[in-house]
Amino acid sequence: MNRSSNDPRRLTRNMDRVSISRREMLKAGLAVATTTIMPHSVLAQASGELLTRMVPSTGVKLPIIGIGTNRFRTGDPVWTARLRDTLSAFSRLGGKVIDTAPSYGDSEQAIGALLADTGLRERIFLATKLDRDSIADGRQRLAASFAALGSRRLDLVQLHNLRGAETLLPLLREQQAAGAIGHIGITSSNDSQYADMEAIMRRERLDFIQVDYAVGNRGAGERLLPLAADRGMAVLVNLPFGRNLPFGRGAQFRAVSGRRLPGWADDIDCQSWAQVFLKYVGAHPAVTCAIPGSTQVAHVEDNLGAARGRLPDARMRRTIASYFDAIVDG
Ligand SMILES: NC(=O)c1ccc[n+]([C@@H]2O[C@H](COP(=O)([O-])OP(=O)(O)OC[C@H]3O[C@@H](n4cnc5c(N)ncnc54)[C@H](OP(=O)(O)O)[C@@H]3O)[C@@H](O)[C@H]2O)c1
């Protein structure tokens, strides 16, 4: 079997920690470390190249923007053609991380078919989830994911919304040891699970966590993101366009509707509000990759644009947050 460049077996396993300090970030080899700690006006990243971060446990390098696919479906040929174009553009522009789950309708089947059709599998870091309680049920569900995705190896399997965290980690570790799974993790998108998530992160060795985090939803930044950095866990960010505002999911777009980008957006090479929102998330030193959901080429182009150019430094991130809070409060 060919080993992809993402295969952790080809990579060193001696990085057990991500830290927020400059020295330690450099030591860990975080590819965007300088962009997050230098003044935002200083650094210009080579155009065309996507900014990447390393998975601390394996050294795999991933672009800081991926794609969420909870609206991917099979069946309608027009929709399928649109999704094929979306994934092709995503990969052509350098995107790698695709996140799906067996509970997203038949998203796994849709992605499996598209990856087979386009021949893109080896270029993709394929992440899915598991949502069962017992080892027997988990094994069955996992086998169905491998079949649906048409892959003998999955780059990341996450326990969806912490389900099975007490029972299924041994199964995931067994599959990881056998080389069928590259990385293991847990997900949440709900503050009510943060305390449980934190306890699991303190107790278990995990390669990844996935959590909701956005300029309008900063709760995960208080404890979970620093803890992930301390524990050497990579972080995928779901719902990077917000959720907890009065407007519901994707809330941030509605909050800024009709507003021109502020002058400071130029200083961080943002051409759209989506890029401001994604760069806010991607510039957090603990974040490995944000996974905005998208089903159209124009959005993929926009979103991957947030993985290029200058990222906001800590001061600029505070400016973005204050600007946004004022809109919501006002
Ligand atoms: N607990 C969990 O594990 C959990 C929970 C929630 C989500 N997730 C993961 O996170 C991913 C993201 O969540 P989500 O898809 O629900 O919500 P989201 O990323 O916050 O928003 C997706 C919406 O934003 C639109 N959009 C994307 N890029 C845009 C742009 N540049 N400008 C304007 N609109 C844009 C999309 O439209 P188009 O489709 O038209 O592009 C779609 O309607 C999911 O797909 C899933 O993989 C995981």
Image (cartoon, rainbow, N blue to C red):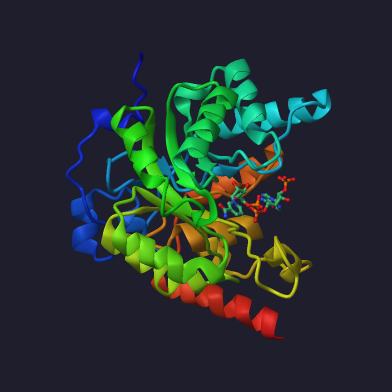
The front one of 188 and 241 is 188
Residue 123, compared with residue 289, is above or below; it is above
Q: How many labels does the image show?
A: 0
Q: In which quarter of the image is residue 69?
A: top right
The location of residue 103, given as percent across then percent down, is 64, 42
Q: Where is residue 296 in the image (x, y as percent from the top left)?
A: 71, 39
Q: In which quarter of the image is the C terminus?
A: bottom right
Image position of 302 with respect to 254: above or below:
above
Task: Specify whether 158 is left or right of 323.
Answer: left
- Regarding residue 1, the answer to whether it shows in the image is yes
* Foreground pick, 97 / 139: 139
Q: Which residue is drawn at 41% across and 54% down?
A: 166
Residue 301 higher or lower than 154, as above or below:
below
Q: In this view, does 19 lie above or below 195?
A: above
| Location of residue 160 in the rendering, given as x and y in whole percent from the top left corner | 53, 50
If the image is split into quadrants, where does the N terminus sit?
top left
Residue for point 51% across, 76% down: 319
The residue at 38%/39% (across/down) is 172
Q: Which of 321 and 178 is in front in this view?
A: 178
Q: Residue furthest top?
A: 1
> Is any atom of residue 49 visible in this view?
no
Residue at image location 70% in from the left, 31% down from the top: 83
